[in-house]
Image (cartoon, rainbow, N blue to C red):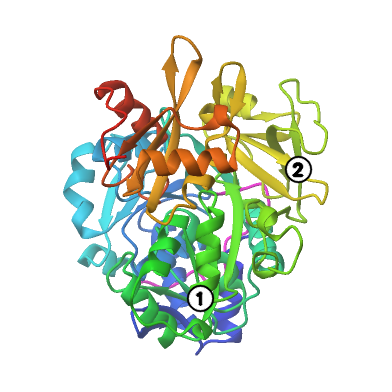
Amino acid sequence: MNVALWLERAGKADPHRPAIGYGRRVVRTYAELAARAARLAAAMRGKLGLTPGERVAVIAKNCPEYVEILYGLWWAGLAAVPANAKLHGAELGYVLEHSGAKLCFATPELESDLAAHAPPTMERLIVIGSPAYAKLLKGDPIAATIERGPDDLAWLFYTSGTTGRPKGAMLTHGNLASAAHAYLAEVDPVAPGDGLLHAAPMSHGSGLYIFPHVMRRGVNVVPESGGFDPEEIFELFTHWRRMSMFGAPTMIKRLVASPADCDPSSIRTLVSGGAPMYVEDARATLERLGPVLAQIYGQGESPMTITTLSKGDVADADHPRWLERLGSAGLPYACVEVAVVDADDRAVATGEVGEVICRGLPVMAGYWDNPEATAATLKDGWLHTGDVGAFDADGYLTLKDRSKDLIISGGSNIYPREVEEVLLQHPAVREVSVIGRPDPEWGEAVVAYVVGEATRAELDTLCLARIARFKRPKAYVYLAALPKNNYGKVLKTELRALDRDRERQPHAGPAD
């Protein structure tokens, strides 16, 4: 089934309901959104000569037109290639070339950079809001969505590429439909008129939640700032009915720390994903905003859909194992199987650590034009995530770290997140990231990069009271801010590079 069919139905069944908001304004009803998507589809198939299955890139900052473009190309039977608008032009050029996209939609500020790096395979660059864009909307619409099957490509999701060239995860109409149903069933039920605020990039996680909101005739709202401003977000939560938002843990932490006024009753759900949320940050969110926090664990290869920690679990402070569950990634979604395995892909015992693997309806079809990576990642039908974790006796999955972030010191495994959770309990630590530093005696030494005013002596005391001595950092390095990507993930690759290059000054920062 073509995912655009949900919009086609909504335009007929609920034509006057708001579909797209920009700031406080309704800019499109469902009838208007469906009509514009159908006209874009006709123009792409007719004037631009594209055929079903061809790829169309969308490289744009968050804007109201983002949704109509996505649904327009799906309506036409095409595949979307949404890309992070903050990437360098050369990186975007690679995505355009690798995907084979003949057409690219872009917001005005990106036009010159994209034009300079456009590959020969890209035939047209159309600026959103330009006369050329307006012309596409003037023709007759395609009356009905082009038929697509569950195995047909819908979204080419390019990974962040922090360890090399990004790979294009092939997400089919079936993958996206399954993920949308999972969201509605297990994370955030949506009623007609409920809102979704796009403060995170629509090219990635936030954009994937467009599907369930269109399916249920909710309203997708783009902030006028186009980005993340806590005061603006709180104002929009109050203005729109029952608003949800997806964000990285760092974004939710900024909301909690904001002094701006907020009525928590106006928030339906805050979905945290993209990286594990620390226990102290989850507790602070509950204290400030109430029981609105849900956490999800997924990857582009299984879009937002591996495990989830529900709002009920997050808020259940009376449960005897509440803190342990709060530090977990939750339970597997009903539509996937999840296992923890050893190096030979054999399931490990409860409580033992191994690689997290999963299989099920949301899991990608493979990587675009990359059979080697596909074979390495999809083995015997299981997606090998590269994440390290363990199941407890109740079936909750706790993520330890990415396998590449594991620290082996003196033959003992040390999981950075465990150390980070302890250090964040100090009130004068705002952020922290732990890495391994090569050590001639121990193999690796634990190093903590800290944003805050806590002294080395204070942090040592805290660690010795909470974790084994061998896990305690051997050095503390103080920074004004941790390096992050555009989605709020801490870039440990950059920290390791910084650690290699900087002079060894473990006492730099607040005095003992």
Q: Can residue 252 be seen in this view?
A: yes
The overriding secondary structure of the stretch rendered in magenta is loop
Q: In which quarter of the image is the N terminus?
A: bottom right
Task: Magenta stretch: give its range.
Answer: 138-154
Residue designated by label 1 = 289
Callout 2 environment at 10 Å: few (<14), some (14 to 19), or many (20+)? many
Q: Does residue 494 show up magenta in the picture?
A: no
Q: Which residue is drawn at 31% across and 59% down?
A: 61
Residue 380 is situated, as x and y percent measured from the top left of the image, at: 76, 29
Where residue 330 is drawn, which disc sits there?
none
- Quarter of the rendering containing residue 145: bottom right
Residue 470 is situated, as x and y percent measured from the top left of the image, at: 56, 27
At numbered mark 2, what does the secondary structure look like: helix, strand or loop?
A: strand
Residue designated by label 2 = 391
- Quarter of the rendering containing residue 311: bottom right
Q: Which residue is drawn at 30% across and 28% down?
A: 498
Q: Can residue 364 be seen in this view?
A: no
Amino acid on which disc 1 is placed:
Leu
Amino acid on which disc 2 is placed:
Phe
Q: In which quarter of the image is the C terminus?
A: top left
In whole angstroms, how far apart are the C-alphas of marks 1 and 2?
Answer: 29 Å
| Residue in front for this viewpoint, 211 or 70 | 211
Q: Which residue is drawn at 50% across and 84% down?
A: 266
Q: Does residue 147 show up magenta in the picture?
A: yes
